[in-house]
Structure formats: C-alpha cells, structure tokens
Image (cartoon, grey):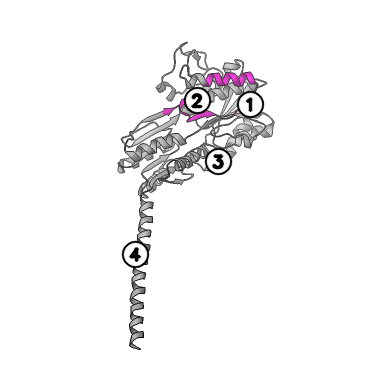
Amino acid sequence: MKKFKKFGILLLVIMFAVTMVVGCGGQKAADDSDKQTAEKFKVGFIYIGTPGDAGWTFAHDQGRKYLEEQIPEVETVALESVPEGADSERSIEQLAQEGCNVIIANSFGYGDAMLEVAKKYPDIVFLHCSGLSTADNVSTFFGRIYQARYLSGMVAGAMTKNNNIGYAAAYPIPEVIRGINAFTLGVQAVNPDATVKVVWSNTWVDPTLEKQAAQSLINAGCDVLAQHADTPAVQQAAEEAGIYSVGYNSDMRSFAPNANLTGPVWNWGPYYVRAIKGAMDGTWKSESYWGGLEDGIVDLAPISDKVPADIVAKVEAKKNEMIAKTWDVFTGPIYDQDGTLKVQEGQQMTDDEKLSLDWFVKGVEGSPKS
C-alpha cells in the first residue's frame, strides 16, 4: 500500500514536470510568434477609392500586393474610400498610431493632411502620390503618364473617322491638363485635322458622373473617347454606343472588348519596393520622384488588333525614343489654343513648366477651367 502511494506521488511529480516543460515550450512558441509578428515592417495605404474600381486605386492596390510578394517581411494595411480633407488627416493619424513604419497616400488632395501628421511622427516615412510638397520625412512620387497618354493619342488619332475625339476629364488641375495636352499632341502627330473636346466631370471616382460626361461627348458627335477618370464607365459608354475608346490606369479591355483600343497604365509595384527597401535599411531620403517609361512605372496597355500595323509601329518607335530619352512629348513647336507659340521649335518644356500647366494646346476644344 505504501509502495503504491509512493508510486502515485512520483507519477504526480512527473506529470507536473511535463506540464511545466510543455507549458514553457508553448509559451516560448507563442513568444516567438509574437516576436515574428512584431518584427514585420508595417506599411499603411490611404486610398481615395476602392480596388474594385478597376482604375486608379486598383492599380495602387496591385502595387501593394506586389510589394508584399517581393518583400515577405512587409505587412500592409489599407484604408479605402477616404475623403480628402479633414477625414484624411484622421485616417493618416490612425495608421501612424497603429504602428505603420511607412504611410502612403494615393491622391493629390491628401497633401496638407499628410504634411500635418508627418510633423508629429518624424520617425515615420510618408509617401504622397501626385503631391507637390516634401519635408524631411515626406516624399512625393508620380510617373510621367503624359508619355503614355501621348502614345494613346496617336492610336486615337488614327482611329477616328470624323476627327472628333472626346475626353472625359476629372478636375482642371495641372496633372489633368498636362495629360489632355499630351494626348492631343499625340492625336495630331498622326492626324493634324482631329480635335479633342474636353468635358469636366469634377470627380475622381463617380461612375454615374463619368458616364454622363461620356454621353455628352457622344451626343456632341465624338467617335473616340478618352478619359482621366477612375472607373470603366467611359469605356462602357463607348461600348454601348458602338464607338472606340482609350482607357486609363489599368487595361480596361475586359469592360469594353469591342471599343477599347489601348490606354495609359500604371505599374506602382517597383517604386514601392524601392522606396520601402530604402526605409527598411535606412537609406531612404526625401525626394520628388517622377519616373517615366524607362522606369516601367508607366506604360501603354496592349494595342487592339483593330489598329493598323503601321500605326502600331509608329507608336512603338515613339515609345522607344522616350525610353532612350532622345525625345519627349513637350518638345516645340507647341502652340496654345489661340495659336500663340508657347514652346520654340526644338526646345523642351522644363519639368517645372509641365507641373504647372494651366493652358490647353492647339487642337483642344474646351476651357482649362471647369
């Protein structure tokens, strides 16, 4: 009986010891897991729209996914449909308090809010897309999408039958005006008789207003539509009307398989990887990045087989010139709507002049003010 009692006590001691070992081991595993999570480099995104728009925000979200694929140590979080203004400041602050090491905002109107929040968090890197103002811990970044717009204009100019091309535009700011001008210069490079009619929708993301702008252009007799708008609504309007269209942001052909000819597209992923690697290894410095076709941040979507081969060849030749930096879009002679020579033959606009454009080139119908 005593022997059995001693055996029972011994068994209890062994069980307690095993429990302690397993418990400590489990705690260690949990601690290791927590440590791994804590070591993730956190990147936050502020989006003006949703990835489902197939446009501007979709392209940025593809870049976010690319970033996570290329750098497994990175964890991302995104806040969608954040209005510009005071709401954006609260959202940027939220990401800062959640421990983001880098915060990226994808719309022009987030600039003031980002600069304000950045003052309170000097150890966080802030990246503002399409912005104009930098600080010690704030960079701006954009791509020379005007290059791809010029190429898409060449396609549109070749495919119009009545020389009336429509452009559904968002807001009358230099970014949009620059794109309209580049597109028009591309149109006239292959078809000097064609004109580009502009209608302002005064929205970045509103498929109803975008489609209304497109319909007004169709009613005005335009037989090719282009857009600076975030959703495929303009493409869908062209498809329904049986005319051609040029998309924007991403390849929108699936939304208008018969209408869509091509479109300027974004590829944000490589820039995100470069910037985040710099933030992670301590080499990041504030900059105003403006890359072009040569960096791959902008490109042209595949050209429809409806476009004649000789036009495709001309487009490719111009694209190669821009990649090689032997020529760029805003090379004179360039005239404004009134016929005044603005850029002398052989001269190029400076980047500062491009970034502050507030006038239309010859061939554009409409006002550079909404």
Asked if the magenta segment contains residue 305, the reply would be yes
User: Residue 14 location in percent, x, y?
Assistant: 35, 74
Mark 4, Cα crowd under 10 Å, few <14 / some 14-19 / many 20+, is few
| Mark sitting earlier along the chain (2/3) | 3
First reached walking from the N terminus: tag 1 or tag 3: 3
Residue drawn 37% across and 52% down?
A: 36
**Would you say residue 367 is visible in this rendering?**
no
Please tell me the numbered disc located at residue 146: 2
Location of residue 133 in the rendering, given as x and y in whole percent from the top left corner:
36, 32
Is residue 132 something one can see in this rendering?
yes
Q: Amino acid at mark 1?
A: Val
Q: Earlier in the sequence, mark 4 or mark 2?
A: 4
Q: CA distance from mark 1 to mark 2?
A: 19 Å
Task: Report the Cα–Cα distance between label 3 and label 4.
Answer: 49 Å
Do the residues bearing badges 1 and 3 touch, measured as CB atoms within 8 Å? no
Front of the two marks 3 and 4:
4
Q: Nearer the viewer, mark 1 or mark 2?
A: 2
Label placed on residue 224:
1
Give the residue at x 48% y 13%. 332
Residue 247 in the magenta stretch? The answer is: no
